[in-house]
Image (spheres, rainbow, N blue to C red):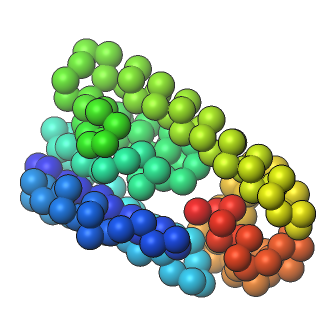
Amino acid sequence: MKIGYARQGIRGQALEIQLEALEQCDTVFSDKAADSAVSQPKLKACLAILNDGDTLFVTRLDRLASSTRFLTSVTDKLQRLGVDLVVLEQDIDTRQSTDNFYSLMAAIAQLDGDTEAADSEAQSSDKEARLSYNQIEEMQYRIACGGTVSELCDEYNISTETFYRLTE
């Protein structure tokens, strides 16, 4: 079965464009970022229905996960389930290679570099955003566990806008 997943971020990455690219799928799940929390409830539902032999389609890895740690967790689960992954815009197709997860891991390393570069840029461009990569991941985790944006912003002494920019 072909299952698609799309995610619109806070900054409005076009969900419609992703959905068009995923039209070939039997079922498509999509999340929209909410102002009050950074979560992916439809991704959880998507992962729950995947079975051995299914293929998960996404347009880009950053639509599947916004942190390397979470992406690694998702890809590990897909591999354990026997589910292939196709990333349309990044030419990753684990159905086509005997070394299917080697190319995926290379893409994960690229995402990690991009995320660290974005984190570094955010820190240097905003005086109040002196947060490490681990602190940003901690904020994402706490939001996923039910924490509130306002509590985290107060604790880390950042604005709401900075929070969303750093956790996108």
The location of residue 144, given as percent across then percent down, is 59, 68
The image quarter in which residue 117 lies: top right
The location of residue 15, given as percent across then percent down, is 32, 69
Q: Residue at x 83, y 53 (%)?
A: 124
Q: Is residue 153 left or right of residue 100?
A: right
Q: Quadrant of the C terminus?
A: bottom right
Q: Residue furthest front?
A: 125
* Up-down relation of residue 47 to residue 56 (above or below): below
The location of residue 8, given as percent across then percent down, is 41, 68
The image quarter in which residue 101 lies: top left
For residue 100, say whether it is visible: yes
Q: Residue at x 42, y 66 (%)?
A: 13
Near-viewer residue (16 or 43):
16
Q: Residue furthest top?
A: 98
* Up-down relation of residue 56 to residue 93 (above or below): below
* Up-down relation of residue 44 to residue 150 (above or below): above
Q: Residue at x 31, y 23 (%)?
A: 100
The location of residue 20, given as percent across then percent down, is 18, 62
